[in-house]
Amino acid sequence: MTKLQFKIYNTVEEIPDSWDALPYNDVLLKTSFLKALEHSSPKNITPNYIAIFKAQELVGIAIIQRVEMYLEDIFRNNNDKYLTRRSKQLISKIVRGNTLVIGNIMHTGQHGLYFNSQAISYKEFLNQLSIVIGQIKSNLKQKENKKVRLIAFKDYFEYDEIHDNQVFFKTEKLYKVQVQPNMVFNIPESWTSLEDYTSAFTKKYRDRFKSARKKGKQISKRELSIEDLSVLESEVFQLYKNVSDNARVNSFILNKNHFKTLKEELQENFKVFGYFIDEELVGFFTLILNNKALETYFLGYNHKYQHKHQIYLNMLYDMAQFGIENNFKEIVYARTAMEIKSSVGATPEPMYIYMKHTNFVANSMLKFIVKYLNPETKWVERHPFKTTLKV
């Protein structure tokens, strides 16, 4: 049996050319995207690029991010009551420190693993990753005298083959935890225009669409170039922070140059659209063109204009329009705000992570902590179309 070997790279420049030559269709695993992340990464995220070889042939790759969790990044809403603040402080003592994320913590979905199933089995691939994780932990201890507190394999759909490897996860003492669903809009093949989309709505949701468009009439919209993103860098960052700081939990803050750097590296595979009122930037949203999937990315808006002009809802409609008119099979709206996303056509896809704390006592409390940080949200799924869509 040919022995498997691995290499850990710390920069994209070190990655072999064979990485991009592998037959996977995920832009978020390609070196252009990884390079952009590396050059605009939040200060608390350090990437490790893993290559697994069999007889000198590259047969598997993985992204493992070291995330340094700090209290001020995890909980940024300072308006909590005393007891809530105290509970957050207690939780932060357990989750604070170094976390290893197998995947990309900055984006919903499984964008961290690929292996050639003709060359190695899933079991062999995961076993190699276990050895790699041990090596990264050892390197961190030797170089910085720091320990890894948490390990997480993130975001797998219910149908993902990784769930067939329960023996591995039990051996590694990793919990399977359900997290908020990924909201995905599957676009019927016959749709080519906005009219196809809106004519499929029931009267209630067609009226809602018209109302949102009417309220957003004052907004002028345009795609932002690299030059625009240079000029508007501070404004874009502040709008992103407006939305990000209101999130229940955070694990990072984007670098100010993040969007410009992604545009420089991904070019036409990354889109930024700005919303302007009287030439003032009041909102923006971003899209990653990932083959036949349109991935929604970060967005931001000025809360002062949000309700009056229905900025967020108009963004969701504009994302749908872009996906339909550019022949995408699906729009990945990601998690959060499930109800309003379902009102524009997205449906929930359950997602799971596998995780553990390296301290035995803390690990026994981890499920409760995850439930607190990721509470089951009560929401009503909306059904905006007259009939079930045939994709």
Image (spheres, rainbow, N blue to C red):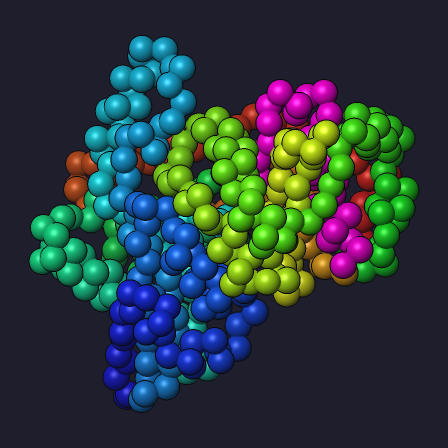
Front residue of 201/267: it is 267
Whether residue 19 sits left or right of residue 275 in the image: it is left
Whether residue 347 sits left or right of residue 132 in the image: it is right
Q: Is residue 137 visible?
A: yes
Residue 140 in percent (x, y) is at 16, 55
Residue 195 in percent (x, y) is at 89, 46
Q: Does the segment drawn in magenta span residue 255?
A: no
Front residue of 374/111: it is 111
Front residue of 127/291: it is 291
Residue 239 in percent (x, y) is at 54, 33
Residue 8 in percent (x, y) is at 27, 69
Whether residue 232 sits left or right of residue 61 in the image: it is right
- Marks counted in the figure total 0
The magenta stretch is: 298-326
Residue at the top extreme?
A: 82
What type of secondary structure mainly makes up the magenta span?
Answer: helix
Whether residue 201 sits left or right of residue 126 in the image: it is right
Rendered residue at 80%/55% (across/down): 325
Quarter placement of the N terminus: bottom left
Q: Is residue 332 visible?
A: no
- The correct choice, above or below, for 144 with respect to 6 in the image is above
Rendered residue at 79%/36% (across/down): 384
Rendered residue at 49%/55% (across/down): 261
Quarter placement of the C terminus: bottom right
